[in-house]
Amino acid sequence: MKRLALCLTSSLLLLCTSAAHAGLIRYTTTLNGANEATPNASPATGQANVVIDDVAGTMTVNATFSGLLAPTTASHIHCCTAVPGVGAVGVATSLPTFPAFPLGVTSGSYTETFDLLNLATYNPAFVTNNGGTVESAQSAFLAGLAAGRAYLNIHTVDFPAGEIRGFLAEVPEPGSVALFGLGAAGLAALRRRRV
């Protein structure tokens, strides 16, 4: 009977955690020169947040930055590096830059929502290299984000390969963390009753 209760509790925990994860998936990063593939001493800083709505099929990119040593020339998300959190790879999102990204400035902010099933959201080479369809590109892009193998960077006149960047990391949903804690506490209580 206790074994059945333990199995049911574990199953419920997994179902609740999966349900809490559906919908919005949030990623965040701090942008700086030290995070570039070739680190630099830029004093610039920034913050980027990417929100994937897996129900609506959209991606919202929010970025703020200041203190760049030179005016901006482009910004986009690169994906997918061979190893999470390190390396450099080609651009995954639209070229030559995110639509309406502020160019020619040393500080600013940016917010835009993208349709993940629109070919214009992606670099054509990324689509070709990842199955040739928008669906396959979306799948590869989302897998790269989830694996920590995608980064956002801001390119400038003095740093054409990128002045500041950061790898995007998933932000755990508070509900998922709370459900996990509740499930762990329940399992601990069941275990104590056994002893």
Image (cartoon, rainbow, N blue to C red):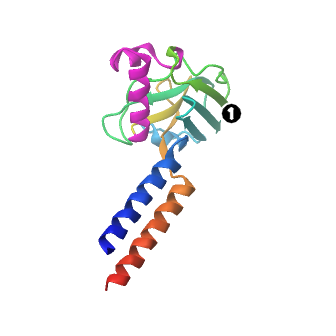
Residue 184 shows in the view: yes
Residue 142: quarter of image? top left
Q: Is residue 72 left or right of residue 130?
A: right
Tell me the magenta residue range: 120-148
Residue 26: quarter of image? top right
Q: Going 43% across and 13% down the picture, which residue do you hit?
A: 124
- Count of numbered badges drawn on the protein: 1
Q: Viewer-proximal residue, 136 or 107?
A: 136
Q: Going 54% across and 52% down the picture, which residue do you hit?
A: 173
Q: Is residue 110 above or below residue 45?
A: above
Whether residue 16 is in magenta: the answer is: no
Q: Is residue 40 above or below residue 98?
A: below
Q: Viewer-proximal residue, 77 or 180?
A: 180
Residue 37 shows in the view: no
Q: Residues within 10 Å of mark 1 (few under 14, many from 20)?
A: some
Name of the residue lying farthest toward the bottom = 195
Whether residue 147 is in magenta: the answer is: yes
Residue 4 image point, x, y percent: 32, 68
Q: Going 64% across and 23% down the picture, which residue do you hit?
A: 101
* Residue type (three-letter) at the residue carrying disc 1: Ser
Q: Is residue 91 left or right of residue 4?
A: right
Q: Which residue is mark 1?
A: 109
The chief SS type of the magenta part is helix
Residue 41 image point, x, y percent: 51, 41
